[in-house]
Amino acid sequence: MAILDEFSFEPMVGDPDDHRPDSVWTFVFDPPTADGAYVRDLTMLFERIAPGDRIPLHSHTTSEAVFVDRGEGLYTLGEETRAVGPGSVVFIPAGTPHGTLNSGRDAMHIRAVYPSQTIDITALERNPAPGTEEDPPRPPYVFDPRSQQA
């Protein structure tokens, strides 16, 4: 159980498949407690996508919901690509390829919710990190933002 109101955003660097140094993100979750009184099955992602940056096409084995707070872009969901803007909500079924392009002039602010404490990612496209341009996408992997706590 927590009320969180301060977040530390980090540049999107270090992922060989999604390198976007001008975009920033943070994962938000209820911090684990010794008494076990915390929400285990929800994780949020807050992201500020820089103009021209894109989240490459990828999928997860869990569903996801994305809310656009600010900015405008193009959202690919399966075979469909549509314009999105403030107030848009994208519901993504598990296993559905999806990605986002910030087509606007300002940062696009999004918030995503995952019904899990871990997030698995299968990269279908890449924003390759320098020096990895010729590499294929890495195999599917599971990310646990709680293990990244300081």
Image (tube, rainbow, N blue to C red):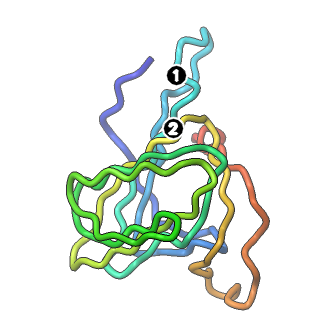
Confirm or deny contact between disc 1 and disc 2 (CB under 8 A).
no
Residue 135 horizontal/vertical position (percent): 75, 84
Residue 9 horizontal/vertical position (percent): 40, 55
**Residue 146 in which image quadrant:** top right
Instruction: Give the residue furthest to the top.
Output: 35
Which residue occupies 57% across, 41% down? Answer: 150
Amino acid, disc 1:
Val
Quadrant containing the N terminus in the rendered view: top left
Instruction: Give the residue furthest to the right.
Output: 139
Which residue occupies 32% across, 39% down? Answer: 6
Residue situated in front as seen by the camera: 8 or 59? 59
| Numbered mark located on residue 39 in the image | 1
Using a 10 Å C-alpha cutoff, classify the residue at mark 2 as few (fewer than 14 neighbours), some (14 to 19) or many (20 or more).
many
Gap between marks 1 and 2 measured at Cα: 9 Å
Q: Is residue 33 above or below residue 113?
A: above
Which residue occupies 52% across, 65% down? Answer: 78
Residue situated in front as seen by the camera: 51 or 6? 51
Residue 40 horizontal/vertical position (percent): 58, 25
Which residue occupies 62% across, 80% down? Answer: 129
Q: Which residue is mark 2?
A: 43
Compared across the picture, whether 32 is left or right of 86 comes to right
Q: Is residue 89 above or below residue 44?
A: below
Look at the numbered disc 2 and give the secondary structure of its residue: strand
**Residue 103 in which image quadrant:** bottom left
